Amino acid sequence: MNKLKILIAEDDDGHALLIEETLQEAGIFNEIFRFRDGKELWDFFTEKKSELAFDSDNHYLVLLDINMPQMSGLEVLQKMKETEILKKIPVMMLTTTDDPREIEKCYHLGCSVYITKPIDFNEFIKTVNRLGLFIQVVKV
Amino acid sequence: MGRLASMVMIMLLGLSHLWAKEALKVGYFDKKPVTFQQENGLAAGIFIDIINEIAEKKGYEIEYHFGEFSEIFNRLQSDKIDLMVPLGYTEEREKQVVFSKEPVITSWGTVFTTHDSPIDAVPDVAFKTIAFVKNSLFYKEFYAITQKFEITCNWQEVDGYTEMFQGILAGLYDGGIGDRLNLVGQGFDIREKIDSRIIFYPFDLYAAASTVKGEKILEDLNEYLKMGKSTKASGYAKILNKWISGNVGTDEKIIKSYIIILLVLTLYILLLVLIRIPRARRQMGLHKFISSRQSINILTYSFMIAVTVWVTDALLEYFWFDNRYCTFLEILIAKNNQHVLFIRLMYFSVIFFGSIFISRLLENNIKEQKKYEDSAENLRTTLNSIGDAVITTDIAGRVVQMNPVAEKLTGWEFLDAHGKYLDEIFFILNAITMQKVESPVKRVLETGKIIGLANHTLLVSRDGQKYQIADSAAPIIDKYKATIGVVLVFRDVTDEYALQEKLRINEDRLNKTFIAANDGMWDWDLVTDEVYFDPRYYTMAGYDVDEFPHNFEEFQKRVHPNDINRVMANAQGHLQGKLERFHVEFRFLKKDGSWLWILGRGVIVERDEHGRPLRFIGTHSDVSVRKRIEEKLLQNASFNEALLNAIPTPVFFKDREGRYQGCNPAFTEIMGVKNDDLCGKTVFDLWPSEHADEYHRKDLELMENPKHQVYEYKIKDKEGNIRPVIYAKNVFRDHQGNVAGIVGAFLDISEQEKIREELRRKKEELEKFFTTSLDLLCIADLNGYFIQVNKEWEKILGYGVEELQERKFLDFVHPDDVEATLGAMKDLGQNKEVLSLTNRYRTKSGGYRYIEWRSTPQDNLIYAAARDVTERIQAEKLIREKNKELENYLYVASHDLRSPLVNIQGFTSRLNKHLLELEKNLFEKGDEDKIYQHLESLIKEQMPKSMDFIFTNVKKMDVLINGLLQISRTGRSVLSISRIDMNELMKSIIDAVSYQIEEYKIDLKVEDLPECYGDRNLLNQLFTNLITNSIKYRSRERKALIEIKGMAYTHVVKYYICDNGIGIEEKNLEKIWDVFFRVGELSEESGEGIGLSIVKRIIDKHNGNIEVKSEPGKGTKMIVTLPKENFIKE
């Protein structure tokens, strides 16, 4: 069985770095791929970027920011859920917005978990740790 | 019944144990479908089937013990039973009992869902509604799992698994927790629809023994399971298949059951047919048969049904006793099995159709019986009440029945006559020859035909009296066409005979008299005082012919007491020769008690030698019609007079010369002139004034042109007041049809005039109110037409009142509001008030105004007051837009400002962590090089990196806050409006960006631009932003081109800024005005996303408009609309 790969789409470099490092500190040593916006991730799924080919036999977990240029996280989520081979990939929304309408929209579109990025760093670490737990579950 | 049979069966089984060798005791408890106790008390289930199969092979005698789990486990520990099934394995238990090596069945916890459920893995249950059964071990296990993942579910406790599954299927729960075997216990239709997605907590079920005997069978069990699990064709696999997949399918027992039921059914029908046949063969006395057999039949059928049900039940039970559905009761209550359903249907059909058949049969019998009794009763009554004599005989001619008339004529009592030969009591002679005549009965019996009335027959009764009779006889024939008797009918015609004789005598008299066809004739023999009245005489007054005797006294009795003297005087007058004829009108008593007006005429036709009258004949003519008319005429005259006196309307009449002929009291009441004073006078005599001229003129007009004349005029009443009246007049004619005079009436309408005046005043007031109201008032009909509108409408909509009235108001309503308006009209049509409807009306200039309505229906009209609320609605719209904008800013603050904060917080914490590490490493002793390396990486790489992130994000926040401030400033700034020379303004803008235009080699075309009004600074910013956007988002693939054009319209000026840049995707066209929205990849040149926000705000402040048209990859066109004339912003 192939090891689970984590795909992060995040336009903010700082956030991306923080997530990656915190995940590692939480003991998640899975391969992490970072995409600078939704379009880059979508290109990856649709095999437009050859060096990092998407393989449907692999196990993936997607972490999505919502507000990204070119293609928003919501758009990526919607497209994934409409595509047969991507439907089953668990998607976690990780964003600064805590607008309940936004959260509802994400769950409606079929995201597995919605996590608000907390400003408090300790909270942030806790959140990412919990994320780690989910990732472990998904691995099972 | 089923219960009884099963009990017998159990008893038999129990007896067999008495002489069997000592049995192996197996304990079990309720864990369907692994082990459970059936309704009939027998053990069943997977384990039981396995034990039974082993016992059969190895020759064990098994004795099952059922109880609670703990009770059975205790018995196992104390060696009271040999084997326990099933038992979960624990180390502790193994110390006390011996477990089978192989588990009999493995189960596990399951999250049950529907097939289309989104739940695939544990995290999916978050925020879902999950059902569980109280005290369930699996719930506890799964709850612990969700806690570990910090998942929150909406837990719902249910009472049992059936409820859980039904809830899941009904959509009440997203899922349910249980053991996988819980589903197996359910019906097939539930099993089909339920899915188990998540599984957890597997566990095995074993058998356990405590005694040597038990251990021995454990060995067999181990061997059996080992063998069974290795092959799919084994008994073990079959048992599992039977209980878990539920494929009981084509079990031969079921086929057997079908055959049994069919057999019993056929037998049942055969029996019914057999019983019906002899009944059908009976030809006569059907009702008797039924009434005698009725009770037996009910018993038979009931018994047969009972036996059928019982036998079927017992057979089914026998063949099915080890299956899950085995008794009649269970079949009735068992659900979800097609076979059972089928059998149940057959059961019900047998009972149902059997019951219908019997009830119909009984109903028929009772009906026939009733019919027979009714007809017999009818016959008896008819015979007794009939005017003719009737005698019936049997086939031998013996009397069977006779009615009272027959008793009277024959002189024989029925009781005496019964059974005697008819000849004995019915003795007849020929009236002419006086010879004995043979009774017709004999002939009827011989010929079988009906014998008609014989003439001149004399019946000699028992006491010797003779009657002239007419008789006839007919055979009585049964339904099989056999003669079974005779009915003889005869009648006494003695009187008729005598009457006929008499008639013959009178006939000649009739012929002698000439009388009108309709007149009654009388012939008075003055010597004998006998009077002959002819038939017409009787019938004229409604009597039967010869109803009263033929004498004068009878006539006298029937003359009206008030008329009798007159009649007698007239008659005497004629008799004495004083009157030439008898001629008098009088009333004659009819049979029904009323009086008939008669004209009696008569003359003496015979006198003796002394001239004394001997015979007086004459006629009676019916003159009631004429009399009635005369009476009516009299009545009418008095009625007219009474009417004239009674009516409150003044009435008068004049002759041709205009002289008053009379008046009624009402006339006198008002005019003060009495009838007597009035007669013979003219209008000029009575009320000389200009009135009289007019009265006269009108009278002449009427006489010249006779018709109903109605007109309004005046009168002067007795007090001298002038009153308005309505005249109604007509002429009356003499018998030759010439105008004989005038009859007239008038109605005082002074009261009505007053009311009319009042109404007119009210209407005027209302009209005034209607026209002066500031609200829009209107009256419309339910068909949607304006009937009346007030002046205000003219002001608001610009149409004249006449233009609106009589037009359909829907014609003015905005197409989008038509539906709502129709809805309101429907409410009004149902007499409901409409208190709040707002719709848009088209003005004459083509715009729309918002009109708010309050309407009330009344008598198929709509009364409405409305108000122009356009200003308010526009203000509301503006506020809504502003609110949305504000909300957008708040959203931006929550997201865009938060994003750098996360970074600042995060990297500050990292920095903190680095510092701690730094501190730790600085004072730690160890490998200097390694420590140095680590410190270097911290100081030179990691810490600067964090610092860098912090600074970048602080800067980013600064930019964002500045942007927000800039927008806010734009919104708050006070406009300084002036005329703008756009050519000049555009030049200065282009000068400011000329460096970029040159650098990127942009082809810029600016046409001559019209002037507009606005704030110079703000418009500068507006066009700068648009042009820099066109530069920023130019296409790198082609030479950039920017075109600026302008066009002046009546009130506005439009400027076009067109480029051939990258364009905007359609989904983003709305968003570009949002603050901080950026299109495309981040790059050096991309802005902070506030440029267009500012543009929009400036446009709004100028009451202008901006429109964007764009095609991705081709270019963008911005159309800016600004005022052409000066305007003052409030």
Image (cartoon, coloured by chain):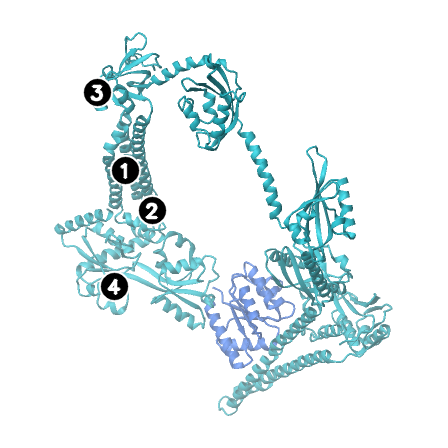
Chain colours: A blue, B cyan
**Could you tell me how far apart the alpha carbons at marks 1 and 4 are, in whole angstroms?**
43 Å
Q: Please name whichever residue, B572 or A95, is drawn nearer the observer in this view of the structure.
A: B572
- Number of marks in the image? 4
State which chain disc 3 sits on.
B
Query: Which amino acid type is shown beneath numbered disc 1?
Result: Val
- The chain letter under disc 1 is B
Three-letter code for the amino acid on which mark 3 is drawn: Gly
Q: SS at mark 4? A: helix
Picture quarter containing residue A10?
bottom right
Residue A134 in the image: above or below residue B220: below
What's under tag 2, amino acid-wise?
Val
Foreground: disc 3 or disc 2:
3
Front one among B382 and B754: B754
Mark 2: give few (<14), some (14-19) or many (20+) Cα within 10 Å. some
Please state the horizontal and vertical placement of residue B439, each as a whole percent of the image: 28, 13
Nearer-N-terminus badge (3/2): 2
Q: Amino acid at mark 4?
A: Phe
Image-quadrant location for residue B261: top left
Marks 4/2 same chain: yes
- Residue that mark 3 sits on: B419
